[in-house]
Amino acid sequence: MDNAIIELNNITKKFDGETVLDDITLSVKKNEFVTLLGPSGCGKTTTLRIIGGFETPDEGDVFFDGHLINDVPPFKRQLNTVFQKYSLFPHMNVFENIAFGLRIKKMDERLITSKVEKMLELFNLKNYGKRRIDQLSGGQQQRIAIARALVNEPKVLLLDEPLGALDLKLRKEMQQELKAMQKQIGITFIYVTHDQEEALTMSDTIVVMNDGIIQQMGSPIDIYNEPQNAFVADFIGESNIIDGIMHDDYLVEFLGKKFECLDKGFGKGEEVDVVIRPEDLDITPTGQGKLEGIVKSVTFKGVHYEMRIVVLGYEFLVHSTDMAPAGSTVGLTLTPDDIHIMEKGE
Ligand SMILES: Nc1ncnc2c1ncn2[C@@H]1O[C@H](COP(=O)(O)OP(=O)(O)O)[C@@H](O)[C@H]1O
Ligand SMILES: [Mg+2]
């Protein structure tokens, strides 16, 4: 593909006879922020390690800037990795930690100083050069781990759950900081996380993985609004997933009622998954909704209420600024564009 800096073509990887990556094909553009997102064990780290050259695929090809790099060792690839455990050198100060890669390259001392100082400035660590690593907070250590990789001026930075060890508030700050920096210096990021919110916040493109298979690739908005299957719908945000039957184009039945929808092309009588986002359901007084249920629980979430509403044994998750108390009977309404029909997963 034009403009692609990294391409994976039909990558398959087995460990002990177990397939952990199954025919992975993806393409990353220059300066793109791409996130591999999926539950633990789905193959994210293995994919990253294949790009980095730390694992060899059993089948398939890896391209860098149009060149096949299957046999190129990690240190000759123009990329750097930030691992989850950032493993800084505790016996070196901040400056020396960042300078490490440049010293290995035997770079001129003055050039090293200027490059490291630029990094310290970029990461708001200007007066920290002489500090010992153990005198720094988790957030500062994380910044140094990233600075230590970036100072080598890689074309691609691989980041494996780099914010996983930070508390929520710091993680959110670092998400903004990293994203801004990535745009500012103009570099390609391939980022791994199991946190869907992090992926939605930071990425240009999200690659949703499960069981070693790419489930969907697209912009955060596309993935959120148009999930291709129930797995993606459920993993990206919360969803109600109900068994349904397609009666005709634009007509689906679930929970004993027929609903207009926007989907077509399914077989008549085909069993489908009906996906409805919690924020798309509206509560009404009894008798005014197409569905009727009993409120099982109500939790105030700040901006909205989260309610669990049971309809014919199915427990809906509903997010609404309106509230009905636990134990009450309410109606539920939804419009055709609130209903998303998916092929049944295996
Ligand atoms: N070196 C290895 N030897 C054997 N199994 C491995 C090895 N590395 C990873 N795996 C297995 O491969 C699967 C994918 O792992 P990984 O890529 O680390 O997933 P993720 O990063 O998405 O959590 C898991 O089942 C894991 O146990
Ligand atoms: Mg991992």
Image (cartoon, rainbow, N blue to C red):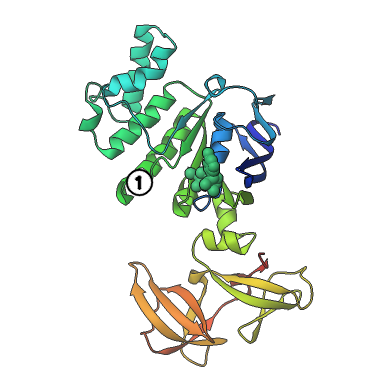
Q: Is residue 320 left or right of residue 218?
A: left
The residue at 56%/19% (across/down) is 76
Residue 178 percent coordinates (x, y): 41, 37
Vertical placement of residue 206 versus 129, above or below: below
Q: Please name the residue that numbered disc 1 is placed on.
A: 171
Q: Is residue 4 left or right of residue 330?
A: right
Residue 106 percent coordinates (x, y): 42, 8
Q: Identify the image quadrant of the C terminus.
A: bottom right
* Front one among 243 and 227: 243
Q: Residues within 10 Å of mark 1 (few under 14, many from 20)?
A: some
Q: Is residue 303 left or right of residue 239?
A: left
Vertical placement of residue 342 versus 46, above or below: below
- Answer with the quarter of the image where residue 230 lies: bottom right
> Helix, strand or loop at disc 1?
helix
The residue at 70%/78% (across/down) is 245
Residue at the far front in the pictured view: 16
Residue 128 percent coordinates (x, y): 24, 25
What amino acid is at disc 1? Answer: Arg
